[in-house]
Amino acid sequence: MDTAFAKIPLSVVMITMNEEAAVERVIGEIRGVAPQAEILLVDSSKDRTAEKAEALGARVIKQFPPKGYGPAMDLALRSGRGEVIVTMDCDGSYPAAMVPVLARLVAEEGYDLVDGARLKGKPEAMPWINYLANAGFGLVASVMFFRWLPDLHSGMRAYRRDLIHGLKYDPKGAALPVELLTRPIREGKRVKVVHIDYHERIGKSTMRPLESAWWTFKRLLRARFL
C-alpha cells in the first residue's frame, strides 16, 4: 500500500445480521487492502457476529431489536469517522480489493460518490430474476435522471462524508441505496459509476423482493420530484 492511500481517512461500514460465517473473512480482506481503515458494523445479530468483529478490532454499534435496513445503513453512514466512507455487505459478495479504488476516486479525484455497479453483464452469482429486476430498475432510473445508472441497489459505494451529512432523505423503509445514489445526482453532485465483480454470498439472504421493488419506485419518484 502506498503512502498517499495510507493517509486517506477512511471508514468501511457494514450492517450485519447473523453474518458469523463470513465476518472474519470479510474483515481480514479489508485489513489486507486498507489497514488504516476504521471498520464499523451496525449489528442486529443473534449469533456471534459482533463478538468476532470486535475481537478483530472492528467498532460495533448494536441495533437490537432490528429497525430495518434503511435505519441501520443510515446509522452506519453517519457514524463513520473517516472523510471517505465505503459501504460493503458482510457476506463475501463484494470484492474488498475495490475499497482502495473507490476511496481514491473520492479522496484524490474529487468525486462525491462512487457507485460500485455489479451489472456490467449478468453476474454468475446473481439469480436471473434478481438480475432482470435490477437491470429494469436501472433502465427506468437512467431515463428519469438522464444518465446511465446500471445498478441502483449496489451495497458497495464510496461516499464523501460531507455528502452524507448534507443529504436529506428518509431512511425508513427498504431500498435506501436507490435514494442515496439518485438524490445526489439530482442535486448536481459529482457521481461516478465503476464496475465491480460480484460473488456468491455466504449465508442466507434476508431480502424481500416485492417490498424492495415497491420501495425502489417510491424512492425514485421521491428523489426525482420531491
Image (tube, helix red, strand yellow):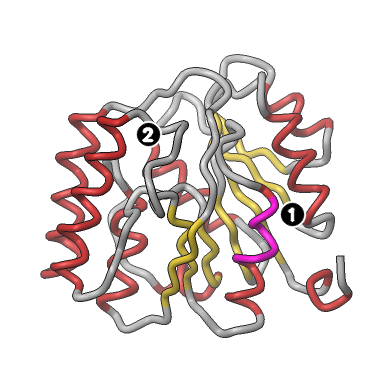
**Taken as a whole, is the magenta stretch helix, strand or loop?**
helix
Q: Residue 138: where, in percent of width, then height? A: 24, 55
Q: Residue at x 83, y 69 (%)?
A: 6
Dot 2: element: loop
Above or below residue 163? Residue 29 is above
Q: Residue at x 39, y 23 (%)?
A: 206
Q: Residue 184: where, in percent of width, then height? A: 34, 73
Q: Residue at x 60, y 84 (%)?
A: 109
Q: Which residue is tagged 1?
A: 38
Disc 1 crowd rating (10 Å Cα; few below 14, some 14-19, many 20+) is many
Dot 1: element: strand
Which residue range is magenta in the image?
A: 97-102
Numbered label tally: 2
Identify the image quadrant of residue 129.
Answer: top left
Disc 2 crowd rating (10 Å Cα; few below 14, some 14-19, many 20+) is some
Q: Amino acid at mark 2?
A: Gly
Q: Residue at x 30, y 61 (%)?
A: 169
The answer to whether 127 appears left or right of 116 in the picture is left
- The alpha-carbon separation of the residues under discs 1 and 2 comes to 23 Å
Q: Residue 8: where, in percent of width, then height? A: 75, 72
Q: Which mark is residue 217?
A: none
User: Which quadrant: the N terminus?
Assistant: bottom right
Q: Which residue is tagged 2?
A: 68
Q: Amino acid at mark 1?
A: Glu
